[in-house]
Amino acid sequence: MHNQRFFDQTLSLIEQGQITVALPMLAGKLFSAQIDAIAWPETRQTLLRHPLHSVLMEDPYLAHCYAKPRGYAGDAALIDILYDRTLPDGVSKRSADLFNVTTAFPAAEAVRLRREYAETLVTTAWQAGKRICVLACGHFREGDRLIGNDLSNIVAVDQDGLSLDVVRRNHGETINVVEANVFNYLRGAASRGERFDLIYTLGLTDYLDERAMRLLHKLMKACLAPGGTLLLANFLPYHIGTGWMDAVMDWQLIYRDEEELASYAREIGLSYKTWTDPTACIAWCEMKDG
Ligand SMILES: C[S@@+](CC[C@H](N)C(=O)[O-])C[C@H]1O[C@@H](n2cnc3c(N)ncnc32)[C@H](O)[C@@H]1O
């Protein structure tokens, strides 16, 4: 009953144009509510059935995530919405107001910072002539700065052919694009004796269970050249947007903290460094051979 009232009042605030008040308030409420694992499914269902949820879907970012047009959560087109924050033509003022708030939330900012970090990393490695492997590359947006260059020392792997079309459109034929599941790709690369100085993946491990995570680490290590670097980033447990992402966006991730990431690095015997990003949403783990 109190959930219903809370959602009624949130909707009323949105209808009065108080979007910058209503949305953070709702995100806070959902963050606290999901801590109660028993009551959470009911809270989530109440929101989904409430007219507030339909109004939130006027936001093109939330609507894309909820609809999953490519059949899975977190596709590269969704991530582009966060990178570019460009509204489609002809949207209403309310849609635009919702969009401007939700794409400024800390988790959205964390995704932009993640790309920024990777941009410096991949640019520096490319300039040094390193052999680079990008796993689950999506649209490889961290490579935007390299457009127009010869990227024959980069292999970009993703299972989604539509995303790879975008990579080819941006970078032409010099980049090595592989449409494959990362596990199959790494197995093949290891057996062919391919080795990379840098292997990284962003936005993949949040979908991998423990067994898959272990396998990924083992296979990445098998493809790592002596002295090479592995890097990944994973959303943190109980970051401030967890309840919001689950209930509003139907976007479920597997959350991990720095210590969990470190344990995978220890298991494959690499030295490592972990850190948390400034938004406190994402943990990073950089592993080195030697
Ligand atoms: C959240 S997006 C991240 C894209 C990009 N790395 C970025 O940070 O902008 C996740 C990407 O992982 C890809 N993906 C998910 N599981 C995969 C798998 N097992 N093998 C290959 N690609 C995968 C999806 O197709 C999607 O492009």
Image (cartoon, helix red, strand yellow):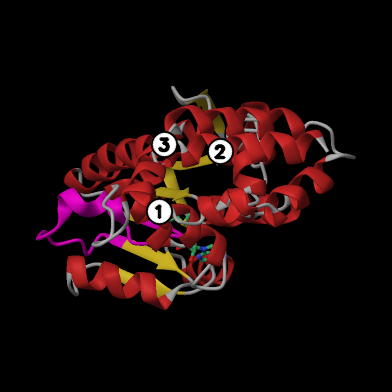
Q: Quick check: is the Cβ at mark 1 less than 8 Å away from ligand 1? A: yes
Inter-mark Cα distance, 3 to 2? 9 Å
Q: Nearer the viewer, residue 234 or 281?
A: 281
Residue at the spot 48% in from the left edge and 41% down from the top edge: 15
Three-letter code for the amino acid on which mark 1 is drawn: Ile
Residue 147 among magenta residues: yes
Residue mark closest to the camera, 2 vs 1: 2
Three-letter code for the amino acid on which mark 3 is drawn: Gly
Inter-mark Cα distance, 1 to 3? 27 Å
In the displayed image of the protein, which residue is found farthest to the right? 38
In the displayed image of the protein, which residue is found farthest to the left? 148
Q: Nearer the viewer, residue 66 or 173?
A: 66
Residue at the spot 19% in from the left edge and 66% down from the top edge: 170
Q: Judge whether 131 appears above or below 4 on screen.
A: below
Q: Dot 1: few (<14), some (14–19), or many (≥20) neighbours within 10 Å?
A: many
Mark 2, residue position: 12
| Magenta range | 133-154
Q: Quick check: is the Cβ at mark 3 less than 8 Å away from ligand 1? A: no
Residue at the spot 54% in from the left edge and 66% down from the top edge: 67
Rendering coords of residue 278 (x, y %): 44, 22
Q: Dot 3: few (<14), some (14–19), or many (≥20) neighbours within 10 Å?
A: some
Residue mark closest to the camera, 1 vs 3: 3
Rendering coords of residue 104 (x, y %): 39, 35
Mark 3, residue position: 17
Residue 128 visible in this rendered orientation of the protein: yes
Rendering coords of residue 255 (x, y %): 66, 40
Q: Quadrant of residue 161?
A: bottom left
Q: Earlier in the sequence, mark 1 or mark 3?
A: 3
Q: Earlier in the sequence, mark 2 or mark 1?
A: 2
Q: Dot 2: few (<14), some (14–19), or many (≥20) neighbours within 10 Å?
A: some
Rendering coords of residue 151 (x, y %): 20, 61
Mark 1, residue position: 79
